[in-house]
Image: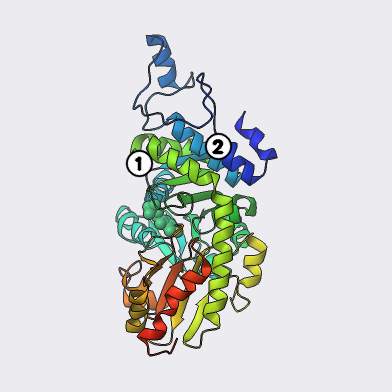
Amino acid sequence: MKKTDWNQYSLETQAVRAGHNRTQEDEHSIPIFATSSYVFGSAEEAALRFSGESPGNIYSRFTNPTVNAFQERLAAMEEGERCLAFSSGMAAIMAVCMGLLKAGDHVVSSRTVFGNTVLLFQNYFAKFGVTTDFVDLTNPAAWEAAIKPNTRFLFLETPSNPLIEIADIQKLAEIAHNHGCLLVVDNVFCTPALQKPLLLGADIIVHSTTKYIDGQGRCVGGAVIASDELIEKYIYPYLRTGGASMSPFNAWVFLSGLETLAIRMKAHCENALELAQWLESQPSVAKVHYPGLASHAQHELAKRQQSGFGGVVSFELQGGKQQAWDLIDATKLLSITANLGDVKTTITHPATTTHSRLSEQERSLAGIRDSLVRISVGLENIDDIKNDINILRAVTGGNL
Ligand SMILES: *Cc1c(COP(=O)(O)O)cnc(C)c1O
């Protein structure tokens, strides 16, 4: 089936069927093509492939049938023309930057993007003469004010980590396009099962497939989805040269991850909403950050833009860092790890882990307090998850 034909099917169907071009062996499941290179029928055929006149594989740094299958499937699910897979989420973001930026360019990014994304702009691209301004994710006027004549793209992550704030993708796409810039959206927290940034006007999506797309915490990977034109002109040449490719084995793991993505996301959302509501009812919890709660500042926007509220909840205790650490240490079931998007519930203290490399001032600007705890809600029974967090009652003498 041609990849364009997948548009007529819904996401659940694309997730289990798209991308598989059956070989002459008639296999039902997508095989792992463990091969670094490919054989040509003749010297002439080799020359035609290298010149691009004849399609077909040359070398697995830039094309591999298993990786191609993953790319086609994710492109269909994001309703994009083309996807390229990378060795990690950061490698995918790096590819967008390397492909699109040159010395003298400018980027506007939300302040609350993934910590390494901030460092990539601040510590590395700055060295090569690309400047970045960081703005408040939720304030479109601030984005517009930060745009300069040399701004190449706006970069955002929505919902953000760890405060789960929501950006208005449609509005920011309009602002970007009015100023001749592109909009790049990191869609890790929602995945295409909950949010389709390209349909809202974004130009490029980046993914860390390490999170919900794998869903079971096994492999590290990333992806970029965009129009044929953007991929062909800016991203593919960089992949071929830069070389941060996804391995066929990882692509095979992510392909099966995609097959269960929609039902997993539904279950993550249900558990997360129930946990957020329960946390909000606890007297010792000062604030719960979850877009599914009516108390969330962008609750209406989240309802409009997303088909579910996601699996990550964060909350602030009334005490400081020690109380947050006590709560985390008192859990028996939850995993103390900074990863997210796993079937296993994970708990972390952002100020001293994922966001510890930010200065105190940067953390304070981003609203990441010492009392903040982040939970990526997994697929265990929700009562078991609640009971495990409840153990703080013992730690604090029954105050939570
Ligand atoms: C994890 C993550 C990344 C980076 O992905 P890796 O696969 O760890 O390189 C980028 N953005 C978000 C939102 C993430 O959660």
> In the figure, residue 296 lies in which quadrant?
bottom right
Other-residue count near label 2 (Cα within 10 Å), few / some / many at <14 / 14–19 / ≥20: some
The residue lying at 49 percent from left, 46 percent from top is: 257
* Residue 207: assigned label: none
Q: Say few, some or many: other residues with alpha carbon within 10 Å of mark 1 (under 14 / 14 to 19 / 20 or more).
A: many
Image coordinates for residue 76, horizontal then vertical, percent:
59, 41
Q: Which residue extends farthest right?
A: 8
Looking at the rendered structure, the kind of residue marked 2 is Asp
Secondary structure type for disc 2: helix
Q: Nearer the viewer, residue 226 or 391?
A: 391
Q: Is residue 70 above or below residue 271?
A: above
What residue is drawn where x is 50% and y is 82%? 287
Percent from the top left, x then y, of residue 302? 62, 66
Q: Pick whichever of labels 2 and 1 is earlier in the sequence.
A: 2
Residue ID at (48%, 18%): 54
- Which residue in the protein does label 2 denote? 228
Q: x and y percent of residue 361 in the render?
A: 35, 78
Instruction: Nearest to the eye among marks 2 and 1: give it.
Output: 1
Indicate the amino acid at tag 1: Ala
Q: Quadrant of the C terminus?
A: bottom left
Residue linked to disc 1: 244
